Amino acid sequence: QVEALKAKLLEQAQEIGRLRSELGGTDAEKHRDLLAAENERLRQEMKACEGELRELRRQQQAPCRDCTHLQENAELQERLSQLQREAEETRAKLAELDLEVQQKTNRLAEVELRLKDSLAERAEEEERLSRRLRDSQETIASLKSQPQQIKYIIKTVEVESAKAKQALCESQSRNQYLQEQVGMQRQVLKEMEQQLQNSQKTVAQLRAQIMMYEAELERAHGQMLEEMQAMEEEKNHAIEEAFSRAQVEMKAVHENLAGVRTNLLTLQPALRTLTQDYNSLKRQVRDFPLLLQETLRNARAEIGQAIEEVHSTNRELLRKYRRELQLRKKCHNELVRLKGNIRVFGRVRPIMKEDGEGPEAANVVTFDADDDAVLHLLHKGKQVSFELDKVFPPQASQEEVFQEVQALVTSCIDGYNVCIFAYGQTGAGKTYTMEGTAANPGINQRALQLLFSEVRGKAADWDYAISVSAAEIYNEALRYREEERLPGGASRAAGELASAGITPRCSPHPTSPALASQLVFEFGHINRATECTNLNEHSSRSHALLIVTVRGLDRSTGLRTTGKLNLVDLAGSERVGRSGAEGSRLREAQHINKSLSALGDVIYALRSRQGHVPFRNSKLTYLLQDSLSGDSKTLMMVQVSPAEKNTSETLCSLKFAERVRSVELGPVSRKAELASWPSQEQLEVTKGPLGDSPGTAAAPGRGHASPSPGQLSSRAASIRRKLQTSG
Ligand code: ADP
Ligand code: MG
């Protein structure tokens, strides 16, 4: 039995040894170590790769900012990061595997420890058993020697061997358990190997991937290097270019500098001369006040002398000027005398509705296209021509008429007396010419306006006073229809003026244009007496006067002037039928006749330089005495109607006009006409039945009355005498 037990023990020991070798604990450990080492190496490699990658990325970031490969780079980076992610995952898996391996190793170590324990237990047991075996063998030997004793001992051995058998049985069951354990361990090992193989495969795959990434990285790196090189080249090129340009510029600057240097060299002498000049100027400035004082003294003396001279010259000039002024006036008077200071204009009004229709309203007046002083009248189938100083056709405007008159108007500023008469039958346009309409004013308003504006224009040298008054002569009686309105605002009663005749008061000239225009408005239209219900009828039997007096003082010379402008709208010149006129009508007609004849007489006497001028024969001539005598100027505006029914009156008016004109203008040869001045009554007589007029019969071209030979010679002689004395 002992032998068997020994054998069994041995067998078990062998079994344990075999199990140990079979377990290959050391091999598995070795494999695991290997794997760990491999892992470590891979990790190192990866770290190196990452470092390189970082480096590359840094390089990439710096120079290649604006490069065209940026996109590619970005892609590469993305892939790189992807790869890194994968590598990370792999690493995590590896770590997991490591952990597992570690756990298994731990478990193996545990199993080994337990195995060792059980082996140690078994060895103890064996030793214990072998000791007991020896003891029992000794006992057996002693027993053999001592048979009784042996019997007893055998009995105990038998008992004891039963015990050993039981222990053996136990150890066998233990063995069984251990074997099971080993089997299990082997299974675990196999699984682990399997796992190891798997992880090795994964590692291989990862390595391949890493290799691929590396290749890609290499490629990207190469590309980047190439780009960097290209950029470097570009940079170098640019630098070279800039350098060469800078060199050229430097050269130019050097040249400029050289020019400036030479300029400086030339400027230095100029500066020297300038400095010298400056010094001399300084000296001069120092001396200047003295010089100036000296010069001023001299200049003052010279100026004083010059002023004295100018003063005396001025005095002399003023004296001469005054003399010249008088001379000029004399000359002007002479000129006017020679040219004729009675001017006669004719104005024909247009045909109007009032003229009616049919042959009565036919136009009988025609004009000469080339001569604006000639007018033709169709009378009884014959054309009679008249020559005046100027003829205004129906279409002539108020303005055109005034233009011809305005020189006359302004001459009263120079101190002349002026008379403008409107003559003609009632309805021929006298009032229209003198007063006009509100929209189209006549001579009165325009004359006033002109005078005021002229006076304003001369205000720098002259003081002027303008006074205006309006009067009316009806049946040889004078009445003032308007109070005299003075520019200063003062007024005088009508009666006072009437008794004083027309002696307008001197007043300061109107400085306010508003006041002037008010005056113009108020006196522009003379409202005549309205005793008669028919205003027009009344106006045709009275003379309306607007009298403007202009007084001037030349402040520099002290010269005083007084001019009077008389604007007269005469009573109608038509002949009142000798038969049928009675009472007041007859008296009116007589008065009109008388005053118009008296006007004619006065003009005649003046022009023929008669010693006696019959001013007193009518109120009108008496009133205008100042303005008709001396170097005064007269304009007769003869108004006619062009209508057929007015032919005889038109003829009379034109004859009157021509006679007035011829008084003055006629040369010696025409003096004959001077003698033919008829009185208004005579006019009527000669006009009577128009065809009977000797003038018209004798001279068809000119409606002149024939003179008596006796009158002719004496008057012509008188005129000649006058002309000689004045000449
Ligand atoms: P008188 O004063 O000679 O009697 P008016 O001046 O009263 O005549 O004129 C009579 C009419 O003829 C008025 O209605 C006037 O407006 C008109 N008249 C006169 N002359 C002209 C003219 N040149 N242009 C237009 N109308 C005129
Ligand atoms: Mg009238």
Image (cartoon, rainbow, N blue to C red):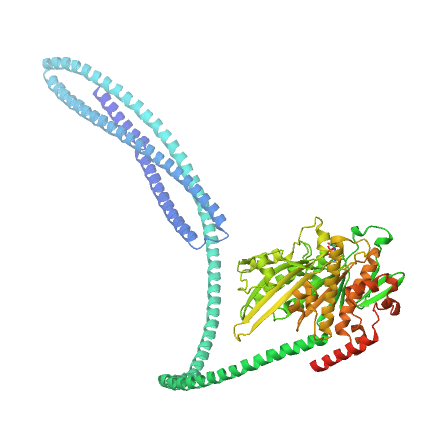
Q: Nearer the viewer, residue 270 or 459?
A: 459
Q: Is residue 394 left or right of residue 698?
A: left
Q: Which quarter of the rendering shows the C terminus?
A: bottom right
* 108 sits left or right of 404 in the view: left
Q: Going 73% across and 66% down the picture, which residue do you hit?
A: 598
Q: Classify residue 561 as left or right of residue 76.
A: right
Across and down, in percent, residue 429 comes to 74, 57
Q: Residue 333: image x %, image y %?
A: 66, 76
**Nearest to the observer: residue 677 or residue 115:** 677
Task: Give whichever of 271, 489 is nearer the camera.
Answer: 489
Measuring from the top left, give residue 134's x and y in whole percent: 15, 23
Q: Does residue 727 appear anywhere in the picture? A: no
Furthest toward the right, the residue is 381
Question: In which quadrant of the rendered view does residue 407 lie?
Answer: bottom right
Q: Compared with residue 513, is residue 207 higher up or lower down, i.e. above or below?
A: above
Which quadrant is the N terminus positioned in? top left
Please state the horizontal and vertical placement of residue 338, each as a whole percent of the image: 72, 76
Q: Is residue 423 above or below residue 179?
A: below
Q: Total number of numbered labels?
A: 0
